[in-house]
Amino acid sequence: MIAFAAVVLLGVNMYVQSQGTQERIQQELSHRLSTTLRIQRISVTPWWGLKLSGITIPQAPGTAGADLLQAKTFRLRIQLASLFSERLVIKEISLIEPHVVWAQNEDGKWRLPPPVTALPPPRTESTPLPITQPTSSIAPAATAAAPNAGSPAASGDTETTRITQPGRSAPEIRRVQLRNGYFHFLDAKGKSVARFEGVEFRSGFRDAAAVRGQASIAKTSLRDHFFLENLHSPLTYDAIALDFSEISARAAGGAINGRFVLQPQVEDSPFTATVTFHDLQADRLMADAGGPAGMVTGRIEGRLEANGKTADAEALAGAGEIILRDGVVQQYSLLIALSQLLRIDELRQLQLEQAHVKFHLSPGVVMIDEVMLQSPNVKLTATGTITFAGNLRLEAQLALDDKIRGRLFHALQENFQPTSDPAFAAVSFDVTGSIDRPKTNLMERLVGRDLKDLGRALSTIFGDDKAERPRKKKKRSEQANAESSPGPTAAAPAAGDPPAMPSPAPTP
């Protein structure tokens, strides 16, 4: 019996490894996925079942980079007894070490590339097949050959009806797992959108249409500026929704918890998300976002509630709040320059008593309801909008208490107007530009109309003297021309006359 089993196993491997069988399997899988799939090797073992090795899916034509998918192994464990029954039982499906690099198409969507190899040739008209629902590859042999026009199968008789009944020939899948996956999503310009490393997924099927399992991701990167570690969550999928019910992760030394629910069967696939976070280190978040380390310190906490549609990235709505505890702002160039100009040492290092941002989301825009940064003597507030593209349009106020304002030049003091808080006076200014390159007219509002020369000096300090350079260059050129041009010829002095004394020239 052992020898017979060995011979059978050897024969099966020789069959599945033959060129014709491997090509048919590749064509069938490519047809099912509507894309090109290549397989390097196929084998069958008693302990792993069907094993596909060296799986690749090429990128779409014109897309740079490696293959869209490279997977080390795909395993399919089958219950042997089910091979002789009407329903195939798949004990486990495993995808080992998939490596996916997926770029958006020109429409900004992630789609599988179209097949670049020919699909199986269509059947000839001489052997028509009845149009039935798709059946599994282990359908009874009576359906393998094309029936004649007058046969019972062609007329919709009992055999065709029996094998297409729901639940009769569809395979039963008991477990699915993904091990050590890597997924990298790019935009249409090739820039990183999201990166997931060490993806693990294992689930069991409650029934044919419901999945329950666990998902984990070792490292997550969003736009290479925000990083999550050790993300875990139970997962449930059924006919109603895909639910990550208890998300937990670490970021910047703090904790993130939340829930994400997606309805893939509904039009445009709407989703809802709830996120809370606490004890995130502000300096680490700043450094991860590409900013200078150590400029802002403290602990960040907050919440976000949002809903939207996966088919429309702009259709996002919700509200949230971000709070900075024990916050300190230091070594910020603008504040240092202000402290030197206004003689306010407190601006060099702001010890924040209050620091929070309240906002809500509208399609394509983050509406800033309130920004509050307050130290014992200085208060900064702002409202406005930030687009999803990063464009800023904020109306802000810088307020000083009477103690600090009393140190200013008299002309500067007059630019600060009383506020609702009698202890503070404020000057209003605007913030425009983008998140990467913000612009403000704070200096202009501080200086006012009566200190234009001081404003030019400040502009020079902040590298904004481009408008003065042509004027200075023109003035120097005029002076050089005046000195080099010959003046009117002086009359020769008469004999015996004392020599004429030169008149004093003006000092430039």
Image (tube, rainbow, N blue to C red):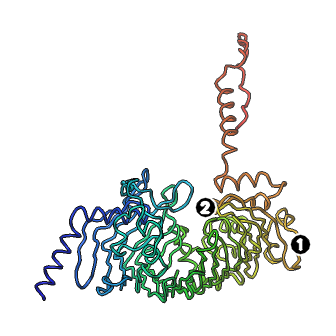
Give residue 483's position: percent from left, percent from top.
Answer: 66, 27
SS label for mark 2: loop
Along the line of sight, which residue is nearer the eye, 307 or 488? Answer: 307
Give the residue type at disc 1.
Pro
In the rendered view, does 398 fall on the left or right side of 39? right
Give residue 346's position: percent from left, percent from top.
Answer: 70, 76
| Residue at the (27%, 82%) spot, across then down | 48
Circle 1 Cα neighbour tier, 10 Å, few/some/many (<14 / 14–19 / ≥20): few
Residue position marked by numbered label 2 in the rendering:
436
Give residue 157's position: percent from left, percent from top.
Answer: 46, 72
* Residue sitting at the far left: 3
| Residue at the (51%, 62%) spot, across then down | 110
Along the line of sight, which residue is nearer the eye, 315 or 171? Answer: 171
* Residue sitting at the far top: 495
Q: Quadrant of residue 150?
A: bottom left
Quadrant of the frame with the C terminus: top right
Q: Quadrant of residue 395?
A: bottom right
Give the residue type at disc 2.
Asp
The tag on residue 294 is: none
Q: Is label 1 or label 2 in front?
A: 2
In the rendered view, does 46 fall on the left or right side of 36? left
Q: Quadrant of residue 348?
A: bottom right
Quadrant of the frame with the N terminus: bottom left
Residue position marked by numbered label 1 in the rendering:
418
| Residue at the (32%, 62%) spot, across then down | 38
In the rendered view, does 173 fall on the left or right side of 26? right
